[in-house]
Amino acid sequence: MEISKAGEYSYAGMELDRSEGQIIEELKARSRDVIPDPDQWLDEDLERNILVTTLDEVINWGRRSSLWTAICFPACCAFEFIAANGPRFDLARFGMEILRASPRQADLIITAGTLTWKMAPSVRRIYEQMAEPKWVIAMGACGISGGIFRSSYNVVPGYNHIIPVDVYVPGCPPRPEALIYGIQMLQKKIAKRTSFQKG
Ligand code: SF4
């Protein structure tokens, strides 16, 4: 590149093209990597606030964390259930301290007591009036098999003769710790449910 007497630039041959080409080549050489977003706070904000899970996980978490029990305690196992629901064992930890007098507001029956055939139609009606999904815990020897009254003419030899049972908690009566263990087993069972079957 030369400067004339009049002070004008004059370019020789392909000099201008070569100069521009050199600038572009240098920029290309420096531009192989992507320039990161300077707003790093945006990524951090997303990482802190987005949780990836499935719809089944969320639904099952809600269901197993708020089991509401229908009032259906026909005999002495009921006292251990009452103890479990008191402040020492504190069923409220599982979101299930509320007992429902209406089966339409309950999704769990804990069969705390001996069931006679005279009472059986009422228990079955309570179960049928509960909305799906619903679960049953057979609490105590009487609830599981009729217990010490099994051979009595008037005792149902286990609730599973009239309604389906999900979890069995043995004992006469089972202590609150055993009932809580049974509740945790039911929660694990609920966690495996799927509300969206394929096909
Ligand atoms: S299992 Fe024992 S404590 Fe429970 S209802 Fe039967 S007799 Fe009573």
Image (cartoon, grey):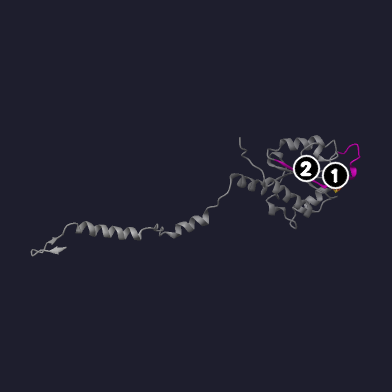
Residue found at x 68% / y 41%? 105
SS label for mark 2:
loop
Q: Nearer the viewer, mark 1 or mark 2?
A: 1
Residue found at x 20% / y 59%? 15
Tell me the tag on residue 95.
none
Q: Is residue 194 above or below residue 5?
A: above
Q: Which residue is mark 2?
A: 72
Q: Is residue 177 above or below residue 159?
A: below
Residue found at x 78% / y 55%? 177
x%, y% of residue 116? 85, 38
Q: Which residue is mark 1?
A: 142
One can see residue 53 in this view: yes
Q: Is residue 138 magenta?
A: yes
Indicate left or right for 176 with 33 as reference.
right
x%, y% of residue 6? 8, 63
Instruction: Name the outermost residue toward the left.
Output: 6
Residue toward you, 189 or 144: 189
Q: Which residues are magenta?
A: 134-155
Q: Amino acid at mark 1?
A: Cys
Q: Amino acid at mark 2?
A: Cys
CB of mark 1 near ligand 1 (< 8 Å): yes
Residue 39 falls in image quadrant: bottom left
